[in-house]
Structures are given as structure tokens and as C-alpha cells.
Image (cartoon, grey):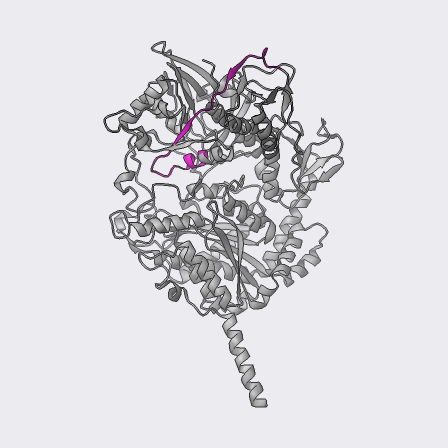
Amino acid sequence: MNTRKAWLGFLLFLLGSCLLGAQTSPEAFLGHPVGADRKLADYNQIQAYFQKIAQESGKIKVFTIGQSTLKKPMIMAAISSAKNIEKLDAYRQIAKRLRDARGLSPDEARKLAREGKVMVLITCGIHATEIGSVQDSLELAYRLITGKTPFDADKVLDDVIVLLAPTINPDGEQMVTDWYRKYLGTKYEGGPMPWLYHPYAGHDDNRDYVEFNLPETKAVARVVYHDWLPQVHFDQHQMNTDGARAFIPPFPDPVDPNLHPLLVRGVDLLGTNALYDLQKDGFKGVVSGSLTTFQDWWKGTSDCTSRIHNTLGFFSELASANVATPIYIGPSEIAEPYFAKSRQFPDPWPGGWWRLRDIVDYDSAICLSVIKTAYLNKEDFLYNFFRIFHESIEEGQKGGPYAFVIPREQADYPTTLRMLEVLMLGGAEIHQAREAFIGDGKTYPAGSFVVLMAQPYRAYLKSLLDVRKYPDMSRVQGGTPATLGDNAAWSLPWQMGASFARIENPFPAKLDKIERVPYPAAAPAPSSPYILLDSSANASFAVAASLVGANAEIYRSKDTVRGTHAAAGSFLIKNTPQVQKALPGLLEKWHLSAAGLADVGGIPKAALKNHRIGLYQSWRGNMDEGWTRYVLDDFGISYTTLHNADFKSSEGKKADLKAKLDVIVFADENSDVIKTGRSAAGAYGRSAEAYPPEYEGGIGEDGVAALRAFVEQGGILVTLNGASRLPLRDLRVPARDILEGVPESKFSCPKSLLKISVDNQSPIGYGMPADAAAMFARGMAFETSLPPTTDWDVKVVASYAPDDVLLTGWISGEDLIARRPAVIDARYQKGHVILIGFLCQHRAQTHGTFKLLLNALLYPEID
């Protein structure tokens, strides 16, 4: 009997061992080592591998955290000790108690920090061509589960819960892998795809953490700010090939003043420990600090937004190969300053072969160092998580600011509510006033929305709602600012066209916390002969576009509609049975109200035609084109994607664009790329200009001639930002960009919000306020000239403000653009050329200037 019990115990031990340790290595599963030359695991294989080891081990559990743009499941694995995996919900609740902070004493927080487990989120592959971390995720999971680590994995995982997302851009990972495999063994091996590796955003998928437009971004936001609340968030990236092998924080100056000092020091601790561990283990060419352009300022990225949510968020950058193809870099090809020793770069890489396996090794070493540091500081990280939230709440109670108020009365109420939804997805607490109240001497009506700053995510709200002026970090030579990774500053209300107020001092008010955005209940559609939709609301354009696409009879008012508040350009819709059927659902979808009109006979108006819209897409993966598609899809506006061949002669006949289209849009892009397809050498490998022949070239001279004929025959050509140089140069629009060729010492404006004055009585300015915020980046300031012939008639729609041009961000030489035109509507023969000299639909975030594009698409027949 005892022998049988012993055997039974031994069998149970073996079964337990099998359940705790994965049996299948990545190499056995894939049929090749992780990081092998010219070998990649695709997303289908990655999902399957994680599911397999989750079946084999009790130390890992796989969750679906969302769905990608192309409907792929997004997975995240929780890896820890088996007993922790069984109690994940309890540890998530501890993190939530520490985050909420109110009603929790320091002693109680200390106790929870002892009981809790530190959670480390590792996100991989947000930029799909930066594929090393995605491949490493399989090996990292296997090493942690099986204990093949430089530390005692069982001991570490008893205190650490690793949340590993193998890619947060699964669509892109599959696209890049498929493209790479397709051209393996050809001269295009390792070269770039001719389209975006996120269907809409491409590289900008990591610039979407301001407004959460993409489903992938929403999924990560729910993990970090709502569902899991990790104390550490490490996001993995790759960079150019010819510099350092790796970048790890500390970051260079400037430091974001909204960050708690413990966050700054905590990120430095994680980075410095990783720097030391990599050096100890013989990894060369690792840099930190001011030798790089990687900054801590812009807060629109995955890890950076984690920091303003009081998580120790940071990223690494590793030198790239040609995807999975090795590259050789000779010593003379290493860029300055990465061939000389310095305090921030004490062990230069000498050059040589660089492989995907090298990237995997560096990525793995950094991940393991981060996990070890989290383990060594478990109680501190958890307690400081509470402390930072606690002190944020206390700081907010003092004022300066005490609150931000978003009045109930807005020019574009549906968009304002959308802004509140964004803030709440970011974890904001929002209240609504039951009664009128006074803040800083001004009365605000009942129904106003109040964002009290005494709340856990104060830093996040201060970053998105406050004015942010980038500090003067000018270099001595030339007086230009230090290079910025992205925006110098931003303001969510200004970007979205919402009015708001900063309240400095505490005030009494009767407020109710809202649990969800209070979208109004759908009102019944009017039964009157005509329907009025106010052009001040972006949503009106979506409804009008849907109805005109169904052949509804629609007009646009030429002035403010008498007896109403409806702005010039408002939509006057004949209320036919067809409209009566479609309108209620559209109003409900867009949270929009409509007014009824008995007659429109006395209203100055112009008919709205169902314009056939074309959007140009080059073969160079233009992110602004992707975001423009996103905006059109979001608004339900139909369009045709145009490629180079659509502009070319065929079978001896010139392209007749007007026969098929009424409006053609060119998103922000280098005009030379549009015309010739030529661009500067890419940064991600030696084959960056090697495209298959069917993806070479641009619209060519034939395309320019076709565009000229298109406008002459009554077409509307719309060019955004840099694309406006095409009509300036090739269609001879009687205007010029005064900033072209101006050195940075004379004018510099890293991406910032500038004040513009708008003629909202002109068709392109319909529905806009008189003053608005324009997102400026490599933008234009025009100077018009007398037209050479009567074929041209140039109207200025918007100009940069006469003074105080900068709203938020950084600018040098603003006098150069003050009063200069920013948007031009140039009539040429029967058609129009619309030049918008800034990013009016930037990353689908600048809702406040969307109307400039939407008006061009819904241009009334007024000529």
C-alpha cells in the first residue's frame, strides 16, 4: 500500500511538473531557432504557440485584450508562478486599490504593497517592421516558464506578474512577414512594403494615444489604465542601422514638469540597471541620454502616455537589420557620434554583421533586466504607485489648476462629447454640474462638465487640457530648438474645437460624477417639409454625406439661417419619404439634433451635388493618406482610392479624370514623391529604395496634365500641407510658400498648435469659428499674387493670426507667418484648387479643423 502511495505521489509530481513547465520550445514549434537568418514567425504561428504553452504550463494564461483593425484577436499572456496565475483577479484588485488611493492610509498601502505582486507589461511590435521583439516574445515566454534565465525564475515570478503582448499591431506583423517571405531570395528581400503596415496609421499607430482612434490603441489603453494597471510598462522598438546598437533611458532633457519625480527616477533606475546588465554581459554599442533624439516630452505614444498615468513607462530602440536579413556595417559606415567613447556611450560597437538574432538577444537581455529590477523593488514600486496617485490627488486639491470646465453650450456639441469619451477612456473622472456655479469669478451654467484635478490621473489631464509651452532648449549655433521626436505640445480641446476654461482656485459646486458620456437621447426627426442641420457640427457633414449619397435633395445656406443659430453652409434637406426613413437612424448614430423648416424659398442657398471623390495613394506608405482614409471612413464618406496608373495615358488616350471624379484629394506628401515616386534613402536598411517595378514612379507629367484638365473642366483639387507644392509648381497657382527654403535659424516650428483666423462665410470655411487652432508641422504660409489671366480667382479662406500666433508648443520667427494666408481657394476656369497649408485632419485628431477638408468634399454648386 505504501509503495502504491509512493508511486501515486511520484506520478502526481510528474504531472505537476508537466503542468508548470512548457514542454515545447519555440524552435521545436517553428522548425527553426528564433531569430534565425531569413526566418520569421507570423502572427498565426505566434498565437498558436502561446496557446500551446498555456496548455502545457500552469505558469501562463493567455487573454484576448481586443481586436485589431482587420479583426485579428489581440492576445496578451500573463506569466507568473502557478499560484499567482490562479489569483490574478485578486492582484488586479490590489493594484486598483493602490491606484484609487482615496480612503487608503499609507500603512494600509504598505500592507497591500507587501501582499501584492508587481506587474510588468511588455509590449512588442507596435511598429511592424521592428520585428525583433515580436520574435523574441516566444523565446522570452519559454525562458521564464522553464527557468532558463540568469536569475532564479521561480523566485522572481513569485513576486512578479509579467504581462507579455507579443505584438500590439498584429495586422502589420502579418503583412510584413508575408511581404518578406514573398520576396525572399530576390533583390527586393528585406525592402519596404509599398503600403502602410497598419491599415490606417502605419508608423503612426504609436502616435494615437491622445485620442484612441484605433482599436489596437483602445485595447492597450484598457490594459494600462483600467483592467490591469501595471506598475511598469516597457515598449520595444527598433531604429536606424548605422548608429548605436541600442538606446535605453535615462532620457535627455527637458523633463516633463507634469511627471512626479519618483516616475522620473524610477524610469532612470530601470534604464540604468539595464545599461549595467547589458554591459556586464558583453553587449556593445548601448547609448543613453543626450546623444540621441529620443525624448520624454511628447505624450502621444504607448509608453509615454503610461508615464502620465503614473506607470513607469519607457522604451528601448535597437538597431535594425533588413527585417530578418543580416546586414554588414563597416567601421567607416558608423554614424557620428557612435564610433567614439563617451559617458553615455562607453563601449562603441566596432561594426560587422548585424542579424535578427542580435536584436532578439538584446531585446531579451533588456526584458530580463527589467523583470529583475521590478522583482528587487517590488514593494517600493507598489507603494510608490500608491504614493504618486495619493500625492496627485492632494496636489489637485490645492488648485493651480483646481479644475477645467467644459461648458455645456458648445458650437459642436457631439464632438465635445466625443472628447469626453476620449478622456474617460484615458481614465479621467468627469463631473457634471447640477446647478450654476462660480469659478474664478465667472458663472458657469448647470450642465457644464467639470474635470476636478484632485484625481488619480491628474498628470494625464494636465498634459491634455493645459497649455504646454516647450521649454527653450535652443542650441547656441543657429538658435534652433533641440530635435523633437514629435509634438512640441498639444491641447485636446483646441484640437477638437471645444471651448474650455482653466479654473485656478477651489470653488463650491453641486457636481455629479458621470459614469459614461451623456449622449442625448435621440430626438424624433422633424416632420416639416425641410430639415436643417447646422454646419457648426462635424456630425452634420456625416449625415449630409450619407443622404446626398442616397440622392437626397440638399442645399447649403450661403449665410446664417435667419431665425436660427445655424451657421453659413448649413444643410437644407428636402424631407422626402426616403429621407424620413433614413434620417432617424443617422441622427441617433451621430448624436445629432435637427431642426425643421417650413420653407427654404427665402434662404440664399446653393445645391449640393453627390461628389465622386478620389483619394490619391502613392506606393510609399503615406501615413497622412492613411489617416485621411480613416477620417473619410469614420464619417461614412464614399471615395475611390487612386494610384499612379489612374493618372496615366492608356491605349493612346489621356486619362479623363473628370469623367469619373468630381473631387481629388492629395494628403500631405512630398510633391516630388507624388510626381516621380522618388524619395530620400530610407532609414531601415540598405534596400529601402528597392521596390518591385510595379510600385515605382509617380503620377508623372501625364498625371499633372490630367489634373490640369480635371480642374479646367470643373473638378475640385484638394491638397493638404506638403502636397500643396504640386499645384503651386506644376499648375502655376498664383501663390507661393514663403517658408520654402527658409533656414531654421529664421523660422522653426516643431509640431505645434497655431492660431488661425477663418473666413467662415466662404464655402471652405463654412461652419468654422472665426478663430481656430491649426496643427502646424512642416507647414506653409502663402503669399498670393495677381493672377496672370482671368482664368484664376484666388480667395484666402484662413490666415495665421496677426499676433500671438502660437497657442501651445514652440515657435521661432512667428512674425514671418503672421497674417499670411494658410488656406486658399483658387478658382481656375470651371474648377477649384484648394490648398490647405497645415495638417487639418492630423492623425484624425484635429476635429476642430476637419471642416476645411469636409467642406471641400461637400462643396456647393455656387459658381
> Would you say residue 363 is visible in this rendering?
no
Q: Residue at x 27, y 26 (%)?
A: 702
Residue 381 placed where, x, y %? Answer: 59, 56
Depth check: give the residue in front, 374 or 33: 33
Q: Does the magenta stretch include residue 605?
A: yes
Q: Does the magenta stretch include residue 598?
A: no
Depth check: give the residue in front, 96 or 222: 222
Q: Give the range drawn in magenta.
A: 599-628
- Relative to residue 545, is residue 352 depicted above or below? below
Depth check: give the residue in front, 238 or 219: 219
- Relative to residue 827, is residue 471 depicted above or below? below
Depth check: give the residue in front, 529 or 822: 529
User: In the rendered image, which quarter is residue 715 located in?
Assistant: top left
Residue 526 placed where, x, y %? Answer: 65, 24
Q: Which residue lies furthest to the left in this view?
A: 652
Residue 444 appears left or right of 749: right
Image quadrant holding the C terminus, namely: top left
Q: Residue furthest front?
A: 577
Residue 45 placed where, x, y %? Answer: 41, 58
Residue 393 appears left or right of 759: right
Residue 131 placed where, x, y %? Answer: 39, 52
Residue 654 appears left or right of 451: left
Instruction: Count numbered badges in the picture.
Output: 0
Image quadrant holding the N terminus, namely: bottom right
Q: Which residue is drawn at 34% across and 53% down?
A: 348
Q: Residue at x 60, y 52 (%)?
A: 227
- Relative to residue 674, is residue 282 depicted above or below? below
> Would you say residue 364 is visible in this rendering?
yes
